[in-house]
Image: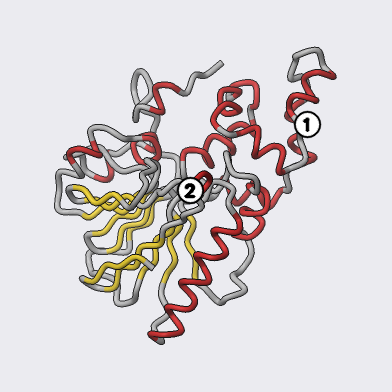
Amino acid sequence: MRKLIGWMKGRPMGQPSPPSRRRIDLGDEPASYPIYAIGDVHGCLKELQEAEARIAADIGRTGRPGLIVLLGDYVDRGPSSYQVIEHLQKPSNLGLRRLALCGNHDDIFSKFIEEPELYTDWLSLGGEQTLISYGIDIHHLTARRKGRLTDLKGVLAEAIPANHRQFLANLPICLKIGNIVFVHAGLRPRVAMEKQSDEDLMWIREPFLSQGPGQPLLIVHGHTPQPTPDIGMGRIGIDTGAYYSGKLTVLKIDGSQKAFV
């Protein structure tokens, strides 16, 4: 069984795996439009819909459409992972332009679907709630099979729609616009973007949280929940624990102006 402990600290044991998820770099010029970043959703559909309604109302007031960047972790812990992915993989009914990035929970869920026997640790990270949202009761399933996960891959293939699997597999891992980087967890301080591993960008906490990026960048990230948005050295953390607090934070960046919507 592949353990996830090393990943949760920011880098797996041994050499980091090569980057596998797409990285989007829109160049060194700052955005000419507002950007709205949404923190970790974690299966909270109602909170996501409310956040998008706030953004739509703000766009209505200003008359300036912008880009919505979601920072990952759409699944696990909350009650509606299936519904959140169903919502995100369809065009916005509010006319919002969305870009969903990959979080560590989304990445493991995608891997679990393909190789469940290697990623069973994911179940203790909130994966059981995700499976329930897809109609899979893992305890009932293993009881019927006397504790074995025989043919779980087949059960997953039947329960999880192909468009959901494709959505998870195709999530990019970061977005850079000008000197701002949107990413799930952060990055390894003083290491060039092209040398950051996928594990760094999806899992890191320290030394990033205390040191910041160590380069002239502003990192907008989630991954580490706090009661309120966490503004540190060269970074803004906006994971406010939606699945237990009910607060899904939206950060608006418009030129040099930053505000919470």
Q: For the residues marked 2 and 1, what is the alpha-carbon distance in whole angstroms?
A: 35 Å
Labelled disc at residue 154: 1
Residue toward you, 6 or 142? 142
| Residue type at numbered disc 1 | Gly
Q: Position of residue 39 (x, y in %)?
A: 43, 53
Residue toward you, 27 or 144? 144
| Residue type at numbered disc 2 | Ser
Q: Is residue 26 left or right of residue 54?
A: left
Labelled disc at residue 74: none
Q: Earlier in the sequence, mark 2 or mark 1?
A: 1
**Residue 70 drawn above or below residue 150:** below
Q: Residue at x 39, y 22 (%)?
A: 6
Give the quarter of the figure containing the C terminus. bottom left
Q: Residue at x 61, y 23 (%)?
A: 120
Question: How many neighbours does mark 1 have within 10 angstroms: few (below 14), some (14-19), or many (20 or more)?
Answer: few
Q: Position of residue 85 (x, y in %)?
A: 62, 53
Q: How is the image coloured?
A: secondary structure
Residue hosting label 2: 245
Question: How many neighbours does mark 2 have within 10 angstroms: few (below 14), some (14-19), or many (20 or more)?
Answer: few
Q: Residue at x 78, y 33 (%)?
A: 155
Please identify the quarter of the rendering in which residue 37 is found. Answer: bottom left
Q: Position of residue 157 (x, y in %)?
A: 75, 38
Give the quarter of the figure containing the N terminus. top right
**Residue 47 drawn above or below residue 221:** below
Residue toward you, 130 or 21? 130
Task: Determine whether label 2 and label 1 are within 8 Å by CB.
Answer: no
Please identify the quarter of the rendering in which residue 200 is found. Answer: top left
